[in-house]
Every structure is written in C-alpha cells, then in structure tokens.
Image (cartoon, rainbow, N blue to C red):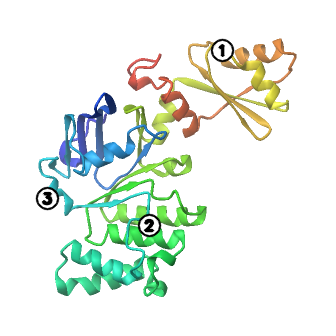
C-alpha cells in the first residue's frame, strides 16, 4: 500500500474484512486511494469488489478493520458521508416510467438541493450529458448508452467529491464506453475521486491506479505499469505454428502459468523460477516435434491478472517475495 499522507487520500482502509456466516467475502484489505484519482477494481465474479465498495460507502458494516473515506470514519459517519458520495450500480436503478427530466428533478429533491438551485442544476446536467434532446422521453424507452448517461448524471447531481461505480459499462457498446471514460476523466480533473469496478482490461489500463481482488484478498495494487513490472512471470509468444498443437505441447511443463491462443499466436506465461523461459518453451515444443522460435513479449494487464490470481505478484507474497 502507498506511503502517502492520509490527508492526501480519499480512501484509507486497513484490514477491511466482511464475513457472511462462514464465508469471508473480503479478507483484510488495505487501500490507499489518492484524491482526484480514477482507481480501478479488477477481479472475477465473487472476488469481493462490490462488497468492498458497499463497505466503503457505508452500506455494509465491516466485520473487522477500519476505513476513512474523505476523512470520515465508516460506518460511524456514514450519514454525513452520503452527502459527499455518488453511487452508480451495474443495473439501471432509476425510474423507468419517469422522463429523463423527471428523474433528475426527483433526485434533486432526494439530495435536498435548495429549491432555487434545482432547475439550474438539472439544466446544466441535461446539457453536459447530452440529454436535452430526450429530456421528455421515459427512461425505460432509452438506449443503453442514454441510460448510462442519465445514471451518471443522477449520481453527480449533488456534486459529490467521491464516485463509486460498480461495473457501470457492462451494458453499453464500445463507443459509449469510450465516451463514458472521457467523462470520468473530466470529473477527475475537477477534483472528483472515482472508484470503478470493471471486467474490461482496456478500462483497467485507463486507471491511474488499480487493485486486483481474488477471493476477497487484495493480490495486487498499484499503477498499471508498475503492476506489469512487478509481475513475477515472463511472457513468451510463439507464432508461425499451429497454436493449438503448441498449447498441447507446453501443457504441464514446469513453471507454466497459462497458455492462451490469440489468433495465430500462442501467448505463454512462465514463472520466473524458470531460468531461461525462452529455451524452456522451445525445448517443450521441440519434444513434441514442433520447431519454432519463441520470443519474449511485453506483459499486458491480462497477464498481470493471471499471475496475480496465481500468487505470482511479488508484493503480496508470490515466489518473488516482498520488494
């Protein structure tokens, strides 16, 4: 975790844990998220991302550990925190039988905006999120991209300092996802801290910082480029041969973490306990009668994810040990 001054952090959590009976959904997670950062949560389904977010915004009480969010303790000061936080869920959670404008006007009352400020703020959001042309349309009839913009507009209506976004782009097309992320960076430049969970590697690469969760445990944490550098594995690619045959040839070899076909290439992840991964892969291929020239490749976040969830990220106790 970062050594940053707690005063510079939007979120500072230590030992955050949540149990449901005998199930530990989140297991002693430490987080240090700077203010005005776009910070990503990456992990498979059931890894504890949503549970962590709910604890941080005061919707769930931790079983153990502590957290400060915008300088306020949760859950102790959760009521005060609500006024400073916006929350956008994976599923569209606004009123489908109300129009766009009616949804925003209703949320302005929910957030207790002063009466004279409501209309100007609604007008501002209609323009900012390109919703003016459909302001009289019922929300239930809108496209996925329009619903997404309306949900985000509602989440920032009260001008929160912190946004929690729980897989917000799962139901929209690539162009809408791209536009959505441009909006997030605009908000970040205005001083808003954003914590976003995602399944998309291209989205994770956009984040200033990234936390990878696996079965409730924080297995990697840092800037994307640092995570790639700290990965305790080597990426090897094989091209110009039958990738399916090559994959069968390397299966079961010492140190193999994964072998994934990417078109005509085979991308292989080898643990660093193997002294010469290039020669190691070449020998496995040759033993199967496949002549090829494996080459090293630059790690991707997908490689980092695979390595981290197999304990091959140095900082959290993989074979490389502590940095």
Sequence-first tag of 1 and 3: 3
Above or below, comparing residue 167 to residue 41 in the picture: below
Q: Mark 3 or mark 2, which is nearer the start of the sequence?
A: 3
Nearer to us: label 2 or label 1: 2
Q: Position of residue 219 (x, y in %)?
A: 41, 30
Tag 2 secondary structure: helix
**Label 1: how many Cα within 10 Å (few below 14, some 14–19, many 20+):** few
Q: Position of residue 5 (x, y in %)?
A: 20, 41
| Location of mark 2 (residue) | 183
Distance between the alpha carbons at the discs numbered 1 and 3: 56 Å
The one of 14 and 172 positioned closer to us in this rendering: 172
* Quadrant into which the C terminus falls: top left
- Helix, strand or loop at label 1? It is loop
Give the number of the disc on residue 80. 3
From mark 2 to mark 1, how far is it between C-alphas?
45 Å
Q: Residue at x 43, y 87 (%)?
A: 136
Q: Quadrant of residue 152?
A: bottom left
- Residue placed at 41% from the left, 82% from the top? 99
Q: Who comes first in sequence, dot 2 or dot 1?
A: 2
Q: Is residue 95 left or right of residue 243?
A: left
Going by the image, does 166 lie left or right of 27? right
- Circle 2 Cα neighbour tier, 10 Å, few/some/many (<14 / 14–19 / ≥20): some
Mark 1 sits on what residue? 276
Above or below 279: residue 227: below
Q: Considering the numbered disc 3 on the image, is that residue within a helix, a strand or a loop?
A: helix
Instruction: Please state which of residues 67 and 167 is positioned toward the viewer in this rendering.
Output: 167
The residue located at (26%, 69%) in the rendering is 159
Q: Position of residue 194 (x, y in %)?
A: 35, 55
């Amino acid at each position: 975790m970062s050594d940053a001054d707690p005063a510079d952090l939007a979120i500072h959590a230590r030992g955050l844990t949540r149990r449901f009976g005998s199930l530990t959904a989140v297991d002693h997670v430490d987080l240090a998220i700077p203010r005005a950062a776009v910070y990503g949560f990456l992990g498979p389904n059931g890894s504890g991302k949503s549970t962590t977010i709910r604890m941080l915004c005061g919707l769930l009480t931790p079983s153990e550990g502590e957290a400060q969010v915008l300088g306020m303790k949760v859950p102790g000061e959760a009521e005060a925190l609500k006024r400073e936080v916006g929350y956008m869920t994976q599923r569209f959670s606004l009123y489908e039988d109300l129009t766009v404008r009616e949804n925003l006007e209703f949320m302005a009352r929910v957030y207790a905006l002063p009466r004279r400020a409501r209309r100007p703020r609604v007008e501002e959001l209609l323009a900012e999120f390109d919703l003016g042309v459909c302001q009289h349309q019922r929300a239930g009839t809108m496209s996925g991209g329009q619903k997404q913009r309306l949900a985000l507009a509602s989440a920032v209506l009260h001008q929160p300092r912190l946004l929690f976004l729980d897989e917000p782009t799962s139901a929209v097309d690539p162009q809408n996802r791209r536009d959505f992320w441009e909006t997030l960076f605009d908000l970040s430049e205005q001083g808003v801290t954003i914590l976003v969970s995602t399944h998309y590697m291209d989205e994770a690469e956009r984040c200033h910082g990234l936390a990878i969760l696996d079965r409730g445990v924080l297995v990697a944490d840092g800037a994307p480029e640092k995570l790639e550098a700290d990965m305790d594995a080597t990426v090897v690619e094989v091209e110009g041969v039958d990738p399916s045959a090559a994959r069968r040839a390397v299966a079961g070899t010492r140190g193999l973490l994964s072998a994934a076909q990417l078109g005509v290439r085979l991308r292989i992840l080898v643990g660093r306990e193997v002294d010469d991964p290039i020669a190691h892969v070449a020998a496995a291929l040759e033993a199967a009668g496949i002549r090829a020239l494996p080459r090293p490749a630059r790690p991707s976040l997908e490689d980092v994810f695979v390595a981290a969830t197999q304990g091959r990220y140095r900082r959290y106790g993989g074979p490389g040990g502590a940095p």
